[in-house]
Image (cartoon, rainbow, N blue to C red):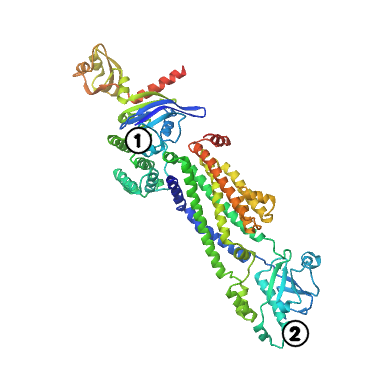
Amino acid sequence: MSKVFIVAKRDFLERVKSRSFISLSIFGPLLVLLLLYFLFALGGNHKKHWNVLIADQYKILDNKIMANENKAITYFFADDYIEIEEFAHAKKFKKFDALIEVNEKVLSNKVGFVFYKEEPSSKMQILFRYHVERRLEEVLIQRFTSLKAQDYRKIKQPLNLSFKNAYDPKEESKELEAWGGFAFGALIYIFIFLFGMTILRSTTREKSNRVIEILLATLRPSQLMLGKVLGIGLSALLQMLIWILVIAGGLFLLRSTMFPDVFDPKYVQAMADLSKGLETGADYFSKLEYNAFVELVYDRIQFGTTIFFFLLYFLFAYLFYGAFFIAIGSSMGSESDGQQFVLPIILLFLFSLYAGYHAIYFSSDTQSNILFYLPFTSSLVGMVKLSVGFAEGQGYTIYLSLFVLLLSSIIMLLIAERIFKNGILQFGHRLRMRHIFKWLKKS
Amino acid sequence: MLEIQDISKSFYHKIALQNVSFKVNSGEIFGLLGPNGAGKTTLIRIINQIFQADSGIIRYKNELLKSSHLADIGYLPEERGLYKTMTVQDHAEFLGRLRGMSAQDIKNALNFWLDRFNIQDWRKKRIEELSKGMAQKVQFICTVLHEPKLLILDEPFSGFDPINAELIKHELIEMRAQGKTIILSSHDMKSVEEICDRVVLIDKAKKIMEGRVSDLRNEGRTGNYKIQFQGNMIAFVNALWINFELVDKQILSDDRFIATVAMRGENNFDSLLQSLIGVIKIESAHEDLPSMNDLFIKAVSERKEIADV
């Protein structure tokens, strides 16, 4: 076993000392952070003008809102009850982007609802909240008190405006989370491909410069193969950990500087300032141009669980696909030969991406369940399913999927060992499928 | 030391070795000879347990050869292979560890060999920075680093300039003096003749000749003598008279020749010299024994002729 570790150490060090590894470790995560920043900052809702219908059955707001009309929002009033389903689909409501429901209890419980057709940006949400709240304050002051507005504001409770998707008021759709899982799954495949190609190149290089013959005079082919897969796998794991640390650190920095938490004390203070009409609060909120990506990354992804299963899926899938790469590498007659045999693996990767995409929208259908256990696709589908969540009592299925993948990896490694053993000392031939089958049959 | 017994090996329909048997004695340099494709490398790979023989056995020190014996063997393959991006020291450490050496032993052995070849400044150099000959030297060091008892060298002199080839030859002779056993596969028959104690010749998967180098050469003796001299060729031929026969002559210059002479009747080398002294100036005179190269070509050609018939 110690010889396996000696080979693994050599391959690990060769990889981590290489310029490409160092560059990818530094620039890779920075590039991802840059991409995330752009998605956070630019990728959201940029609807310039909002038509908002206020359903005010009891005429509480008296068809009025804000003394100075805001250019970004036009408010319309309806004095009857509007069904959400009707608002979402009826032709007459087509021009409205959101419905604010003001019911008779709003004056006592301070609860209102905003049903949107397309999720408003955080800034827009704050404007809705601000406009409605200010109008309600006036109504309350007029109707029920003899207080001055300033005195009222001192004793008022904040209004809780709950934002709901008009098409999915119960928020059953987990599409956003599913895309998060897909991103993690895709990352697994990108890493496996990168490091799988490293296995392939390293094997063919050893074969073509004939160092393989010296190595095989000191250890068994299976030890060499295992050491190689282990060493390159560990370097992949190290790179992945560097990525996770740098990206996590970057996300933390972005969170504390550019995309602050709407629930943190700073936010609450600013909210209070805004409600007092102070400029500092308005300035603060003008920076909050959040979108779905910010919400996905900071609020919806459970990083602890996700990273745990991400690492397990990566590890097992790496062993599974690594076996393919090492089998091809050991069978090649020359360094350039055998590239054609990488094509089926690329097709499998593309199929896996499609499987993950399918699972985003149909995470529980039969196909997704089959693909969840199929070792070729299970990593991606598994990550999507994990992000969406499992029904009660179904949590064990992810362990079953991992077990199937691990078992398949062991079988694939055993098959690859046979091809490796018989193919590694064959030089100068033109690789054909019949060679692989011949080496498979040979003991 | 090493006993090869009825080893056969086929690759699909091609027979690489057929019932090959021979013994390598402890403390000798043993030549493994044969034309290209004869099966030498296959046999070496079987000894190194890279391949498994289809039939036959190999004994090492009277035990069946097993993987634990590989620690006693040093192997330099014909196709040299080193990791281009690794330094000389890293290479030595990697291969030394695979051979079961401790870090300290590797350090000491590497120091010894770098000093011996006067190449201490190569230690931190990457293989890709070295010339072919320099890399060959590094490979030789990596092969002998763990002080193997049995050294298997496939074409050890190829790629070396004459000075370095001599240096390696000298090291091999020194190792033999220390009691190490060396199996040498080479097409350089001059070197084989110079340093090998015994040889085996393999052709077309079969053993066709085995024995001590001196015995094999003596077996092929013709009784002719070679005389290198300065003087007149006609005077030389006259001096031979009817007791000797001029078989061949080689003109070196106007008055310098190498003549091959056969004895007639009871005449011998002494009487030949007596006949020539005073007639020409003898520069050298020795028995015309066949070289290993002659024996090699003769043996392989004869088999070819038999096969053609």
Residue B73 occupies quadrant: top left
A361 sits to left or right of B236:
right
Name the element at disc 2: helix
Camera-nearest residue between B180 and A118? B180
Locate residue B153, reporting x and y percent. Answer: 37, 35
Residue B34 seen in render: no
Q: B102 or A48, which lies in front? A: B102
Judging by the rendered image, the residue that carries numbered circle 2 is A143
Q: Mark 1 lies on which chain?
A: B
Give the Cα separation between the discs numbered 1 and 2: 107 Å
Residue B249, by quadrant, is top left
Query: In front: B226, or B156?
Result: B156
Q: Residue most toward the left? A: B278
What is the three-letter code of the residue carrying label 2?
Answer: Arg
Q: Which chain carries label 2?
A: A
Picture quarter containing residue A262? bottom right
Mark 1 lies on residue: B150
Q: In this view, does B301 lie to the left or right of A374?
A: left
Up-down relation of residue B178 to residue A176 (above or below): above
Q: Is residue B81 left or right of residue B258?
A: right
Residues behind callouts 1 and 2 on a single chain: no
